[in-house]
Amino acid sequence: MTQEQTTASRQTLGFQAEVKQLLHLMIHSLYSNREIFLRELVSNASDACDRLRFEAIADPALLSAGEELAIEVRYDKEAKTITVSDNGIGMSREEMIQHLGTIAKSGTREFFSQLTGDQRKDAQLIGQFGVGFYSAFIVADKLRVISRRAAAAAAACWESDGGGEFTVEPAERAHRGTDIILHCREGNEDLLSSWKIKSILTRYSDHIATPIRMVKEEWDKDANELRATGEMETVNRASALWARAKSDITDEQYKEFYKHVAHDFSDPLAWTHNRVEGRNEYVQLLYLPSKAPFDLWDRKHTHGLKLYVKRVFIMDDAEQLLPAYLRFVRGVVDSSDLPLNVSREILQESRDVKLIREGCTKRVLSLLEDLAQNRPDDYAKFWTEFGTVLKEGVGEDSTNAERIAKLLRFSSTTASTSTAGDGMTSLADYVARMKPEQTEIYYATGDTPAAARNSPHLEIFRKKGVEVLLLADRVDEWMLSFLTEFEGKPLRSVAKGDLALDALADAQEKEEKQKAEDEFKDLVARVKEALAERVSDVRITMRLTDSPACVVVDKDAMSAHLQRMLKAAGQQVAPQAPVLELNPHHALVQRLQGEDAAHLADWANLLLDQAVLAEGGQVEDPAGFVKRMNALLLGRGSM
Ligand code: ADP
């Protein structure tokens, strides 16, 4: 009884704080785009029809034979209302409270903390966030939603003026479905015309597969005005866009369809649309977004494609249709072979799905190759937004690793002069610029591009004019464990082991190195003894020009950068003592030659700490470092 009493009552509830913020921003930032409200409401109505059709597969009673799912848009000039109705899945009272009072996306709070107050920028950000249902408040100062969930006995009404609160109460609705009734905000009366609404629908919603109906109007000659006829007419093509011939679809229609499937506000960057025939038949329409969603890095972030089977919507976010490293791709796959009652579990095991996944992967890679080749500026945009995700493919997809490697872009010590002019280089371009004697592709890793660029390890490369790739993404070290060579050229860290730079050294330089090794043999041994377990070895190097020393790790050891990242991620890392390399040309190193044992230990520790700092690392004993440094500044050392 109590339950019934609560459902029978009128309840006033507050919007989640973020919804309030969103409403406020939307009304102010998106006004110049106000027509999109209709696209958003029609998109939701069409999703609701899709979901009903899907639930009816398991429960045929939900959809009686011959019943057609449709969307209706009406307006009333006197009442100043526009109504968008559908006979889709509907919402229960609880669902209304949940869906129309809160934002379910994770990361919402973080998203709102990024807003700047600058309307233009915020409008962009809101676009990325997705505007949805709430966009109705751009043109409405009061909104009523009457909805009845499929198979439920009662309907409910939700109402709000877009301030801080909304109400829910019981309502009447003859059948399942939803009516969204907008009371036009002052200044939006021009929307109350059949011509205007039709033109917005044609522009933004023509691709919607569910029919959109409006009351047909005719010119009444006697009254000299348009009159409703009582008949309904369908104002969109009402056919699945992806099922049409490519030649029959305009770019504008492709773009609007993208906004519907991706719940995105901006245009896509590129798309690919194909019908695959043969043993496994399906249509794929795949899009690259132009902006990363705000929650791309959220683990709970949903991804995947919309799956249809013979035009019937089956599920959103079917992540089995693409590998994780292509999770930014949006779009539709419509299979002719899968059963209508396919579940996520079946998808995981299905051979057909595996083939679709391979097919989609190949298509996306081709699309990226095409973009890189023919629209390098757009490819650069793509890379900025999603490059880090694509890098995961090098490790995850061994079949396509080579193709992915060609799509990678890196900053480098000379890339700003590369043809693309975007400060990034491909591995192929790097190889084309290699010195004739150069056999390896060199890279430096660091926490930031600047740290990588300023690493002392680069000194010799600068001197020799050898290009070095600069890697600063968290995923880079992991990726490099898979990407060991490109076109037969090994990739080599500038901070690891002995460099194969000998090939680049002339006879005189080789002789010089030999001489220095002989000359500093004694010092090297003494420094090694002084540093004991802090280093695994000490040696003379020719790789430095300006710095006195640097640390390197063995060729097969974990790089210092990776060790730091693993530690930061809370993982146990067995300490690995680095090799300290000394620059025989540096005055500090030369002066060490004559030091007594006590001072030598201080200076050796100082050089090591400096080298670690220059690498972006942390010194083990900061206080000791500062003390030694101060002693040096005061000239108390004998240097
Ligand atoms: P999104 O569509 O991006 O999820 P919206 O704010 O547009 O976000 O809508 C929120 C939710 O409200 C939808 O996910 C859906 O569950 C529900 N909803 C909106 N419109 C309808 C409708 N016409 N019929 C049924 N449910 C709807």
Image (tube, rainbow, N blue to C red):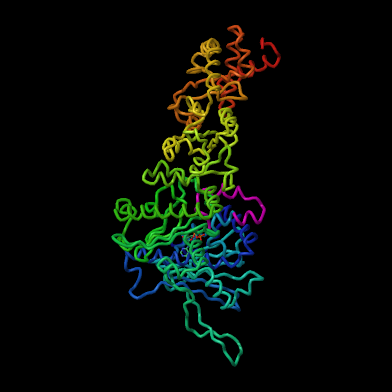
Question: Is 363 on the left-hand or right-hand side of 181?
Answer: left
Pick the front one: 430 or 137: 430
Looking at the rendered image, the quarter that the C terminus falls into is: top right
Whether residue 3 appears in this view of the structure is no
Quarter of the image where one finds residue 245? bottom left
Check the image and report above or below for 353 versus 462. below
Quarter of the image where one finds residue 481? top left
Whether residue 374 appears in this view of the structure is yes
Q: Residue at x 47, y 61 (%)?
A: 261
Pick the front one: 476 or 236: 476
Q: Residue furthest bottom?
A: 222
Q: Residue at x 55, y 76 (%)?
A: 75
Q: Position of residue 596 (x, y in %)?
A: 60, 6
Pick the front one: 514 or 155: 514
Q: Position of residue 556 (x, y in %)?
A: 43, 27
On whether residue 25 falls in the magenta region, the answer is no
Question: Is 606 on the left-hand or right-hand side of 262?
Answer: right
On whether residue 118 falls in the magenta region, the answer is yes
Q: Residue furthest front?
A: 507
Q: Residue at x 47, y 45 (%)?
A: 389
Pick the front one: 160 or 250: 250
Q: Position of residue 594 (x, y in %)?
A: 61, 8
Quarter of the image where one finds residue 183? bottom right
Span highlighted in magenta in the image: 101-124
Q: Position of residue 248 (x, y in %)?
A: 45, 71
Q: Residue furthest right?
A: 634
Check the image and report above or below for 534 versus 453. above
Number of numbered labels in the structure image: 0
Looking at the rendered image, the quarter that the N terminus falls into is: bottom left
